[in-house]
Each structure stands twice: as structure tokens, then as C-alpha cells.
Image (tube, helix red, strand yellow):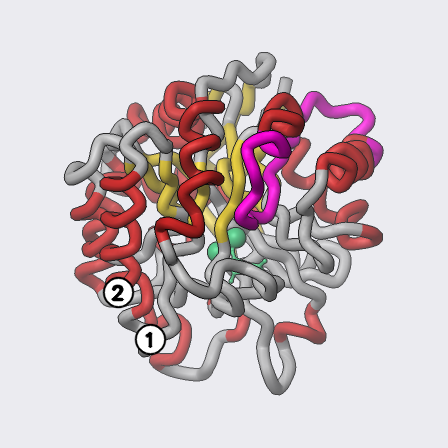
Amino acid sequence: MKTHTLLMPLDMHLHLRDGVMLENIAPLSAYSFSGAIIMPNLVPPVTTLDDVKKYKKRIMATVPNDYFEPYMTLFYKNYDKAFLESVVDNITAIKLYPDGATTNSDGGVSSFDIEEMRETLEAMSELDIPLCVHGETAGFVMDREAEFMSIYELLAKNFPNLKIIMEHITTKAAVDMLDKYDNLYATITVHHLLLTLDDVVGGMMMPHHFCKPIAKRPEDLDALLSVALEAHPKVMFGSDSAPHPKNKKESCGCAAGVFTAPIALQLLCEIFEQYDKLDNLQAFVSDNAQSIYGICPEFKEVVLEKRPFEVPASYSDVVPLYAGKEIGWAIQSVE
Ligand SMILES: NC(=O)N[C@@H](CC(=O)O)C(=O)O
Ligand SMILES: [Zn+2]
Ligand SMILES: [Zn+2]
């Protein structure tokens, strides 16, 4: 049987939520990943050192037997330098949400006034704290990410020593930005390597394919595939696995978020094999992230095998991408 081994897989964009959802969901990522960047969009968001420490403890309590490093983040506010100095050892990045752009982003940034943000972003540059960004404007839904490119340029030019991660990119416009500024990087999800808008609303409306940013056009998918499959050194895997209870997805007013954590590595193997690029998958799911973030996860070896695997209908009350469908790869062992 054909197998493929991945060492220390990292998920550089993950939503674990809190409470019962956290307990149900975190073990699924901890099983197959060495670590993950944990998004701070709880209600209320993670904004203090105490919030970070307590949330990390709650995460660790759900995964007592697995080696798994939750790389913690704060929800971006215009923090002052003294505060950032006091938290730098407990966080890996800060996540910026435009106010209201996505699930649980209320209280995010409402105007990108560089002078208002300068103290925070200069301190982050000095302290080497990367800025992760949900890059969407309030424009027409298909144009929001492309319109945000001017804000990325403004940030990249004004803060050349700040590492800026364009999170979950979905457009050719974002792919084209990567090589324009040394300090711009990106994460790409697995669902954005598989879906276009047609898979969301082209036939029957598919709530489990609905997320922010919404999947775009075939040419955008091709651009994402081109940098992911080559494991462009500024690109990392970030699942943006975003669980919502089934009744919040299959409802009038569907919550944004696609749940992929337990099947992400399997799907990535399938995609990379299909394009004969399996040799580049290690860089995409771990090595690039280790270099960009300067992190050194502990050893974990995940062996995947090429065989049909039926995706469960649900994990607790969360419906994953491709629920009930057969995919081409499965996890054989984790050590
Ligand atoms: N991606 C999503 O559609 N949803 C995420 C938030 C986010 O990453 O934008 C969530 O928290 O549910
Ligand atoms: Zn987002
Ligand atoms: Zn997200």
C-alpha cells in the first residue's frame, strides 16, 4: 500500500473554541498535529495575559495524552508597548480582525489609521511578534479580499520589520502580493484548494462549504494551488478549521466556517499526490511554518496511507467537510 510520512505537521490557523466544543474538538487536532496557532476569537475575545494563560490551560486539559503545542494569540487592539513586553513570552502572534468581517470579530479594527496603529505595530516589529490578518474589506463579498490588498501594502510598507501573515488567502490577487514585499506571508486552507464559489452556491446551497473569505473563482483556485503545490517558502498550511454546531450551519442564517481539522492531512495528501507533488507537502505543512515563525515543535510522525476512507457524518455535533463521502487517503499511524 502506498504511504506517505509527515513529520511535525503544523496547523498555522485553527479555531478550537471553548467549553464543551473545545473538549470535543481539540483532541482531533492534537492527534495528528504537533501544534497549531490558536485563534483568539472567543466571546469575549482573548485580550489579556490572563486570558491567554487560562485559555492555554483549558486547551491543554483537553489533550492530556498527546504532544500538542497550542501557539497562543491575542485579539488585536491598539496595545501599548509595555503591555506587549509583558505578554511577548506567552504569545506567538497577534490576530487582527476588521470589525464585523467574520465570526466573532466584533470589537476588531474599524479604521486602518496607520498613525493610530503605529505604537502597537512598531512594538510588535521590535519584539518580533507576527501580525496575522483576516484581510477583507466591507465591500462586495467576492471583492473583499482583493480590495484589502491596498491595506496589506500600507502595513507592509510602513512596518518593514513586521511579519505580516495574510490569513486564509483565497485569491490570485493575494498570491501576487506574496513576492512584492519581503515581510508578507500567507496561510492557505485545504478547503480553498478544493472549492470554488460553484461548490458553495452553484447548485444546491452548501452550508458546510460556507466560510469567510468565501471560495472564489477557478483562476483563484489555480493560483492558490500553484503556490501551495510548490510549497512557496512564504506560504504555510493553516486549516482555518472553524467548527460550528450543526444547528448553526444547517439553519436560516448559516454561520461562516468549514470544519476540516480531522481530515486535513488526508485531503492534503490526496491533492498533492494528484498533482505528483507529495515531496513538497512536508514543507507546506511544517517546514515553511517552522522557518517563518522560528518555532521548533517536538517530534511527531504521522504516516498516511492511500486507501478509501469514509469521512464521518459528524464529530460530536459538528459536520466536517465531505461528511459521509469517501476520500482517498487515511491516517495509518501517529507516533
Ligand atoms: N473562517 C470562517 O468562516 N470563520 C472563522 C473566523 C475566520 O477565520 O474568519 C470562525 O471563527 O468561525
Ligand atoms: Zn478569518
Ligand atoms: Zn479563522
Q: Nearer the viewer, residue 154 or 149?
A: 154
What residue did someone put label 1 on?
A: 139
Confirm whether the magenta stretch covers residue 69: yes
- Mark 1–mark 2 Cα distance, whole angstroms, equals 8 Å
Q: Nearer the viewer, residue 139 or 203?
A: 139
Residue at image location 52% in from the left, 45% down from the top: 95
Residue at image location 69% in from the left, 21% down from the top: 67
Q: Which residues are magenta?
A: 61-84
Q: Quadrant of residue 157?
A: top left
Q: Say which amino acid is labelled 1.
A: Gly
Residue at image location 56% in from the left, 38% down from the top: 80
Q: Say which amino acid is labelled 2.
A: Glu
Looking at the image, can residue 148 be seen? yes
Confirm whether the magenta stretch covers residue 191: no
60 left or right, relative to 262: right
Residue 221 place in picture, x, y as percent: 25, 56
Position of residue 312 relative to residue 64, above or below, is below
- Of helix, strand and loop, which one carries label 2? helix
Residue 108 place in picture, x, y as percent: 54, 59
45 left or right, relative to 50: left
Residue 72 place in picture, x, y as percent: 63, 34
Position of residue 270 relative to residue 256, above or below, is above
* Mark 1 touches mark 2? (CB < 8 Å): yes
Position of residue 70 relative to residue 147, above or below, is above
Q: Earlier in the sequence, mark 1 or mark 2?
A: 1
Looking at the image, can residue 189 be seen? no
Residue at image location 80% in from the left, 45% down from the top: 23
Q: Quadrant of the C terminus?
A: top right
71 left or right, relative to 273: right
Q: Residue 147 shows which numbered tag?
A: 2
